[in-house]
């Protein structure tokens, strides 16, 4: 005992010594810095004038190469693309020229070390912005963004990203490459998981909430927040065939009406940076696209922050067949309006040459550098370049963060089916004495985190098996059977990056071995009172560079599910995945289906809370759920250009399946029931005044639960065909059994306008409109109103 106390004292002594040494060093460095370049007197929130003076002071002292270095983001790991261009290590560049930013360094000590290099050894001592993909957490991993969107709870999303920002900042990260707000209507595209789904209105709400969570609601500069970066600008989700990086062809009206609103919402919330996308948009690569980067972003939206390319996207302009060579790529990207080159080193090498040859002016370079320096100054980087490593442990281990993550799981899981009220399961030990947890995702940890969650510095994760064991304690026997291997033949490039190396492939199985694994699971199910079958996709299967031509449950999972169901035991299917899957068989034969998405660090606990009724599911789908892959792309807010399939003649339909989704956008069940009535709508209003809509919702079941009330509209005629329905309002409300609530919505200019392809501008038109209120996009409660001149 005494020995342990002595050891601890010694450890404290060492820590204190380290802190003292660090402060002494910092003091000495700051004295040395003051001697060479007295810093402008910046308060914690510098005034605009102070910011301008500091920027201009620096610009006056900078060489062209130093300026271009500010427009470059250096890779924090070895990448051949950078080496080919720059012929120096990133650290050498840092030392000699400084840099705008560095990415892919997640270790706080290494971040501080590199920052010391930039601040002490580069001539002008300009600190570096450290950037990382903190998409849904750094240490505490929250559910993946598609899950967070399923909560329809922007307040909770903001709180979660506040936690993510706090942890990331404690680790020395200043800048996150999030939120990802790409609208996704095609589930073959693996990056659907990173966004808020298919709808621009819900997408805008989630974009706003995330920016506010990351950056805070006031100006940049809080020590526990990070700079946000809305991405991927724009149209990335419309990739041909759902193939990641493939071309998008999106007409201008669809850009304005569908793909751009979440970006605009992020800008309105004050996002400080934007990331350009990889793909061609209408034959012009997004990273060198003057329409996107100049006309939309700067001219129409007056964006004052800076734009970073996606990784190596400047260099890729050559691959696209858009730039002749790398110098042309640098020219086209820069003159289109792209401020910072991520990781390729193309700007570093070629922008100085462009200036020397008179193709780009120093003034243009200065204008771009200003946006980067301004951001660093406003963020307080010059006063506080380093992270205080002693803040790390208490921040990462704050139990409130895990609580928050568990709460997020409970609010985002979507109950898709619950025949005969199989769920919630009894945990009292009266009716259920044995539980079989079955499936390749039943006892996995990293796969609950999704790709970006696994690529940062995640803390411990609770698997679904662990969550269930913890929940039932000794009241029921819990046993696990894995089923066939799923984590095999992983073609993802991310399998090889350092951060994900820990993930191991499982060996290939012969058909006999796979069948044996199924037989074992079946035998376990037979000996149990209930089977919880956990299936879906490993983390890298729904991610960047992870498109799929089929949404089927792969690698023997469908066979496993059908075999376990054939035992006649009650089966609960829990899906762990990043996109809707083809579950048409399950939707008819498996009584309970729970969509858990990638639920993050507290996945196992949150799902157990739902399975055993300590929480009531309340998530609603942010995407239309297809019956099969052949229905893709599918989205609820389509136009009705052909007769619907209910008509008798020339129907818009497939011969073999219905054209409606399996589950509509906005759908989600609860352990209680809700009734909607008393819809009131202002019947006529003059253009310019708002339409008021109200409705009542009552909890008609026996449990407390949250209802997600959704408002949809349809404009019946106008200068363009309008979608059959469009989400224009929602509210999440908690109701005790028997309680009711009146929800109020206002439909003003923002909700009623659309970008008209005929008029080539935003219009509100004096027309007749339909209104629906309910808890999914097929809601039946209908009203109408007329807008007059
Ligand atoms: C992804 C971006 C990400 C970047 C930096 C790219 O491959 O497309 O979303 O932010 O890498 O890691």
Image: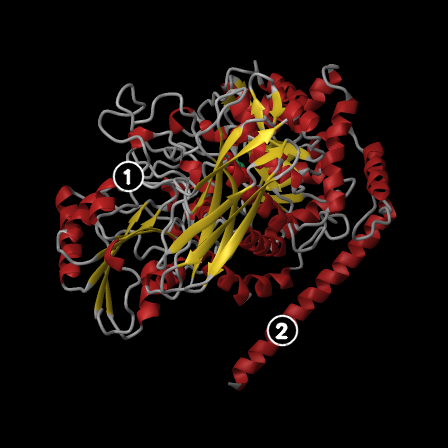
Give the residue drawn at x 35%, y 41%. Answer: 580
Residue 747 visible, this angle: yes
Residue ID for mark 1: 582
Q: Nearer the viewer, mark 2 or mark 1?
A: 1
Q: Quadrant of the C terminus?
A: top right
Which percent across, then down, holds residue 148? 48, 49
x, y (%) of residue 95? 70, 40
Query: Relative to 136, does residue 336 appear above or below in the rendering?
Result: above
Which of the two discs, 2 and 1, labels the residue nearer the N terminus?
A: 2
Q: Is residue 313 visible?
A: no
- Within-10-Å neighbours for mark 2: few <14, some 14–19, many 20+: few
- Which x, y percent locates residue 577? 36, 45
Q: How is this picture coloured?
A: secondary structure
**Vertical arrangement, residue 376 with respect to residue 716, above or below:** below
Label 2 belongs to which residue?
12
Residue at x-position 28% and y-position 39%: 582
Does the CB distance between marks 2 and 1 fall below 8 Å? no
Q: Residues within 10 Å of mark 1 (few under 14, many from 20)?
A: some
Q: Nearer the viewer, residue 91 or 556?
A: 556
In the figure, residue 343 lies in which quadrant?
top right
Between residues 259 and 22, which one lies in front from this camera angle?
A: 259
Real-space Cα distance between discs 2 and 1? 56 Å
Q: Give the residue at the far front of this rendering.
A: 683
């Amino acid at each position: 005992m005494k020995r342990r106390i002595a050891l601890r004292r010694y450890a404290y002594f060492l820590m204190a010594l380290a802190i003292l040494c660090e402060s002494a060093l910092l003091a000495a460095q700051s004295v040395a810095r003051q001697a060479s370049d007295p810093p402008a007197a910046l308060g914690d929130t510098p005034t605009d004038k102070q910011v301008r003076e500091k920027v201009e002071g620096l610009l006056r002292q900078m060489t062209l190469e130093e300026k271009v270095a500010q427009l470059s983001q250096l890779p924090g790991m070895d990448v051949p693309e950078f080496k080919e261009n720059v012929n120096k290590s990133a650290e050498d560049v840092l030392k000699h020229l400084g840099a705008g930013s560095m990415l892919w360094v997640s270790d706080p000590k290494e971040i501080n070390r590199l920052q010391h290099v930039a601040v002490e050894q580069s001539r002008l001592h300009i600190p570096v912005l450290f950037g990382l993909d903190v998409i849904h957490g750094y240490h505490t991993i929250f559910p993946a963004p598609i899950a967070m969107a399923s909560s329809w709870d922007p307040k909770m999303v903001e709180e979660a990203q506040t936690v993510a920002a706090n942890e990331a900042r404690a680790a020395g990260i200043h800048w996150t490459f999030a939120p990802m707000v790409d609208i996704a209507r095609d589930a073959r595209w693996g990056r659907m998981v990173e966004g808020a789904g298919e709808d621009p209105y819900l997408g805008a709400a989630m974009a706003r909430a995330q920016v506010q969570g990351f950056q805070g609601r006031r100006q940049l500069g809080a020590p526990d927040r990070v700079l946000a970066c809305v991405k991927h600008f724009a149209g990335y989700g419309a990739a041909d065939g759902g193939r990641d990086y493939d071309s998008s062809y999106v007409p201008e009206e669809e850009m304005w009406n569908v793909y751009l609103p979440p970006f605009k919402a992020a800008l309105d919330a004050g996002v400080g940076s934007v990331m350009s996308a990889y793909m061609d948009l209408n034959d012009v690569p997004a990273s060198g696209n003057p329409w996107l980067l100049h006309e939309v972003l700067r001219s129409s939206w007056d964006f004052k922050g800076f734009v970073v390319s996606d990784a190596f996207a400047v260099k890729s302009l050559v691959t696209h067949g858009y730039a002749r060579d790398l110098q042309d790529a640098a020219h086209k990207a820069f003159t289109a309006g792209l401020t910072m080159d991520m990781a390729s080193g193309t700007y570093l090498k070629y922008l100085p040459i462009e200036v020397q040859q008179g193709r780009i002016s120093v003034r243009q370079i200065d204008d771009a550098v200003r946006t980067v320096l301004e951001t660093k100054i406003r963020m307080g980087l010059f006063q506080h370049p380093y992270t205080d490593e002693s803040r790390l442990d208490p921040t990462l281990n704050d139990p409130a963060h895990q609580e928050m993550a568990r709460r997020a799981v409970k609010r985002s899981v979507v109950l898709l089916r619950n025949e005969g009220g199989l769920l919630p399961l009894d945990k009292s030990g009266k009716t259920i004495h044995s539980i079989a947890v079955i499936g390749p995702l039943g006892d996995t940890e990293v796969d609950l985190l999704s790709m970006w969650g696994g690529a940062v510095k995640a803390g411990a994760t609770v698997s679904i098996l662990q969550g269930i064991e913890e929940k039932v304690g000794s009241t029921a026997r819990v046993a696990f059977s894995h089923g066939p291997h799923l984590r095999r033949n992983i073609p993802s490039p991310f399998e090889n990056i350092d951060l994900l190396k820990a993930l191991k492939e499982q060996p290939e199985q012969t058909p006999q071995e796979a069948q044996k694994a199924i037989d074992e699971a079946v035998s376990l199910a037979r000996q149990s009172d209930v089977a919880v079958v956990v299936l879906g996709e490993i983390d890298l299967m729904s991610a960047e560079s992870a498109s799929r031509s089929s949404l089927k449950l792969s690698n023997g999972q469908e066979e496993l599910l059908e075999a376990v169901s054939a035992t006649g035991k009650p089966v609960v299917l829990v899906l762990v995945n990043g996109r809707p899957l083809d579950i048409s068989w399950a939707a008819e034969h498996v009584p309970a289906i729970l969509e858990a998405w990638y639920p993050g660090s507290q996945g196992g606990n949150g799902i157990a809370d739902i399975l055993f009724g300590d929480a009531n599911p309340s998530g609603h789908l942010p995407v239309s759920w297809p019956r099969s892959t052949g229905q893709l792309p599918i989205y609820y807010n389509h136009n009705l250009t052909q007769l619907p399939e209910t008509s008798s003649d020339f129907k818009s339909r497939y011969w073999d399946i219905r054209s409606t989704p399996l589950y509509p956008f906005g759908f989600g069940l609860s352990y209680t029931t809700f009734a909607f009535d008393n819809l009131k709508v202002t019947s006529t209003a003059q253009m310019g005044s708002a339409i008021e809509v109200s409705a009542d919702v009552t909890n008609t079941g026996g449990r407390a639960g949250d209802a997600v009330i959704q408002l949809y509209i349809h404009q019946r005629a106008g200068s363009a065909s309008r979608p059959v329905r469009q989400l224009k309002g929602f509210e999440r409300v908690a109701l005790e059994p028997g309680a009711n609530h009146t929800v109020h919505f206002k439909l003003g200019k923002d909700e009623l306008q659309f970008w008209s392809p005929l008029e080539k501008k935003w219009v509100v038109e004096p027309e007749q409109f339909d209104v629906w209120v309910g808890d999914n996009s097929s809601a039946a409660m209908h009203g109408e109103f007329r807008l007059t001149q």
